Image (spheres, helix red, strand yellow):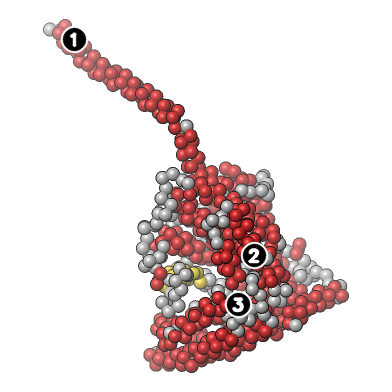
Amino acid sequence: MNKRWNQISIVLMSVLLLLTGFTPVHAEGEDFDEFLKQEWKQIMESDYTTMHFSVKDYQAMGLTKPEVTLGEISYEEFEKQVVELNASLEKLHQFDFESLNDRQKIDYQVYEDNLVNKIAESSFPNYQEMFNPYKGHHSDLSTTYTEFTFYTKEDIDDYLTLVDDYDRYMDEMIDLTAKQAEQGYFMRDAALDVQLEQMKEFIDKGEENPFIVIFNNNIDQFEGLTDEERTAYKERNQDLVLNQVLPSNQKAMEFLETMRGKRSISGSIYEYPDGKDYFNALARLKTNDEGTVQEKFDYLTKVIKDSMGYLLDIATSINYDMEEQIDDFSKPEEILAYLNNHLEGFPKGPDINYVASYLDPSVANPSVMAYYLQTPIDDVRDNVIRVNGTSDAGADMNTMYYTLAHEGFPGHMYQFTWYYSQDINPIRHDLSMIGYTEGWAQYVEKIMLNRSPLNIGAQEYNSLNVFLSYTLQAAVDLAVNGLGYSNEDLKSWLTDLGMSDAMKPEDLYDAVVDMPGQILPYGYGLAKFWELRERTESALGEEFDLEEYHLQILTNGPRNFKIVENDLKKYVESKGKTLPDEFTMFEHEHKEGIGGVNSILSFVDKYKVPILIGIVVVVVLILVLLFFIIRGIFRLIFGKKKKKKAVEEYHE
């Protein structure tokens, strides 16, 4: 009923626009910039947690603080969001696109994309999972508390207000989940078991709970409090956590157990009546690409096939230790410093401060090595990368190296601070283009691996393994959740790729069923950035300049890939060339990297007999030449001595 109403509300809005004879208003550019600033202000002033994580000093930014709550979760709230988002989209469309300057046109398109994506997402509230262990609101809620920064004493008071609001918000999450489950929308039992185990560990920590430990550490580090104030804050927080937060989680656990088996389908969300439509919208949001699911799947299949040939060359390389490990660093700080000093080919970014801050052991997840905390728009200088200290001692340093390239230089931290330090409209700070941002961070991993202390074989082997892992999982996600592939369908597809012996379709299937859309921005975005680079390099040939290329990518900030492609077309055309439509993944990498080395080695192996004869002939010629040179030198020396002696005898 609620889903139906959401769809009707969108149709009614479109009908009303037609009936009123709606036409765009030709507004000035300054009006458009002000419109976007007012839209951003409305976003900030309507949600406290969004404002807190987006702005350091809300008063200096001219904002009014909204009510300090966690917000609301309900079907009615999603319906309200659809109406509000459609209203913003209508106001946006009143501006004449062609009258805007180039920067404003990009802002227009990015905001339009965000509105359309959010309208689609909010129109499917049954897929908004509260307790999914991999992507649910419950895990997001924990991050809100553990990463909450205290800039002022007011923030501490606001934080405690949010902790006091935890129980109410949890009740709303439980209520929505119950209504979803009544209609058959619920996680699989395997995912439920993971969620229940995580919640049990959270509860069992008691006074060592991260909500207590991290808060106490932050209070100790906050300057300007008396000892009495510190004690009072700590006691207040501990009381709220022990008597509200933990009991709320216990109540949620008991409720979730009663929901076991409520999922009405056995496979992927494709089996739900509206599953295909939902995943189409989800794929558009996650990839920042308007193509169909089938088009995206076919594209990634080609990308994987292209890359397999390159990986085969790497795997059969001669005299390379593919499993070589980086042993030049012992700490994440050393890796970040190394990466920061190897940014050739990237435009210079702003001078920033950054620290590798270790996660508290109470919240450290062994599967997460590090993550970047996006800075507020009014303080891009101070940056933090969280590192899992519990896994640091025994960490795979190769993985730590490219993970920090992803999160730090030239990944998220570099890309965000580079763009946010430009003169941008503040709304761009809070518009999500996850396919672009995660695609960029994945793309630069390979570049920085090629600058690591590893041998060329290990560099390429590591980077291609990561590339294929993400693109393969993204393709499987599209196939299973978007196209309805079964395990047998996956097996046939893997066989066609020549990967059936190395991959178990059941494992791939189960992973994407529990996490639809999660891997898409990483795998698809990664492929798009390398594809665009291959096409640009093919067009420009020897004129290709890596720093110029990256400048085109970065200048207009996170945006959909159609805009990125258009920007590159203009750039290539400015040099009198044309951006080709066709591409072969890693064609230029293959020629310049280990592929080129392998070609030489293959040539040597094929023609080793004539090459050996040629080498022997050259060596003999060199020896003969040396013989005549040495003989000439001896004759010259001894000839002079004989001549001198003859002259002396003559004079005598």
| Cα–Cα span, label 2 and label 3 | 18 Å
From the image, tell me which residue sits under label 1: 647
Q: In front: 270, or 619?
A: 270
Q: Position of residue 568 (x, y in %)?
A: 64, 53
From the image, tell me which residue sits under label 2: 486
Residue plotted at (57% across, 68% down): 511
- Marks 1/2 in contact by CB < 8 Å: the verdict is no
Identify which amino acid the numbered label 3 is placed on.
Met
**Left or right for 520, reference 413:** right
Helix, strand or loop status at disc 1:
helix
- Location of residue 37 (image quadrant): bottom right
Crowd class of label 2 (few under 14; some 14 to 19; many from 20; radius 10 Å): some
Q: Quadrant of the N terminus?
A: bottom right
Identify which amino acid the numbered label 2 is placed on.
Ser
Residue plotted at (61% across, 48% down): 584
| Cα–Cα span, label 1 and label 2 | 104 Å
Q: In front: 398, or 479?
A: 479
Tell me if residue 603 comes above or below residue 476 in the rendering. Answer: above
Q: In front: 580, or 140?
A: 140
2 or 3: tag closer to the N-terminus: 3
Residue plotted at (46% across, 35% down): 604
From the image, tell me which residue sits under label 3: 187
**Left or right for 235, reference 297:** left
Q: Position of residue 528 (x, y in %)?
A: 61, 57
Crowd class of label 1 (few under 14; some 14 to 19; many from 20; radius 10 Å): few
| Cα–Cα span, label 3 and label 1 | 110 Å
Tell me if residue 476 comes above or below residue 546 in the rendering. Answer: below
> Mark 3 against mark 1, which lies toward the viewer?
3
Q: Position of residue 264 (x, y in %)?
A: 66, 78
3 or 1: tag closer to the N-terminus: 3
